[in-house]
Amino acid sequence: MASKKSYKKLKPEEWKNEILEFLENNPSGFTITDIAEEINSTRTTVSKYLSLLEQEKKVLSKEIGVYKLYFSAERRFMALNLFQAYYKSLLMGIKDKFSDKQDFKEIGYQICDNLFDFFYNQFPKSIRDQIKSFKDFLKFFGKVYPELDFIYSDNLTIQENVNLENEEAIYQFKNIGILDFPLDLEYHFYIISGMIERSLTKIFKKGGKRIYSDIQSIDKKNKIVTLTIQRK
């Protein structure tokens, strides 16, 4: 007979602190099932205390497809506006050294090689488990990405045109806050493109086809970037 799993026994405030600490350290959002598995608890317990934390406005939730993800209402990390200012200055410094867009894509490759595990784990486990193929990724990407991003803006939306038969998709990133900055920062998106391309190549390397991620266009006036992802 299989042994029954042993769960932690905590007081109500301890459970709330445990859940809140987990969400503060994992800002990309997690489902009830994910949280329960990570903190060694049951879905019933986690659901109960998440409801209380939402009432206290310490936790936020958002539905993405069939999933409901939970987020901490506060950040423990560097102030977002400070980080964005630092990143923009860093990007302009790099741009002074490089001028070719492919160079920036190469930087994206290197970032991915060094931080692949971190980026991979930013996708909630319940959603990762649903992505069994490259086609599955194309279906989920536009819905999940706005919750993972920390550069563009709180109002970022993605309009998608996915062709599963041809294994290709076009994503329009709209309301991109970084384009409000008075400097020319379009090279940021080539870095992101390189990171996406290298990550997908690592995950879906079987089949003999190559995965490409490219910037199709950048509309600064309307703050829209169009990205293509395809396997051929």
Image: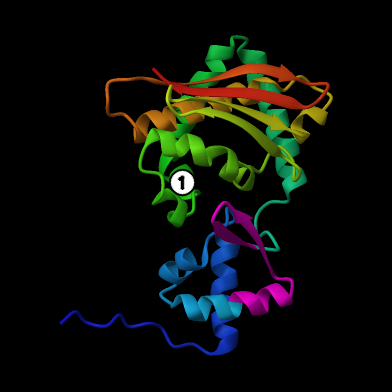
Does the magenta portion include 108?
A: no
Nearer to us in this view, 183 or 227: 227
Q: Residue furthest front?
A: 165
Residue 219 position by quadrant? top right
Q: Position of residue 13 (x, y in %)?
A: 60, 85
Q: Categorize mark 1 by other alpha carbons within 10 Å: few (<14), some (14-19), many (20+).
A: few
Nearer to us in this view, 111 or 168: 168
The residue where tag 1 is placed is 118
Say which residue appears at 54% left-offset and 81% top-offset.
15
Say which residue appears at 34% left-offset and 32% top-offset.
204
Q: Which residues are magenta?
A: 50-71
Question: What's the residue type where badge 1 is placed?
Answer: Phe
- In the figure, is residue 153 to the left or right of 193? right
Nearer to us in this view, 127 or 112: 127
Q: Is residue 123 above or below residue 185?
A: below
Q: Position of residue 161 (x, y in %)?
A: 59, 28
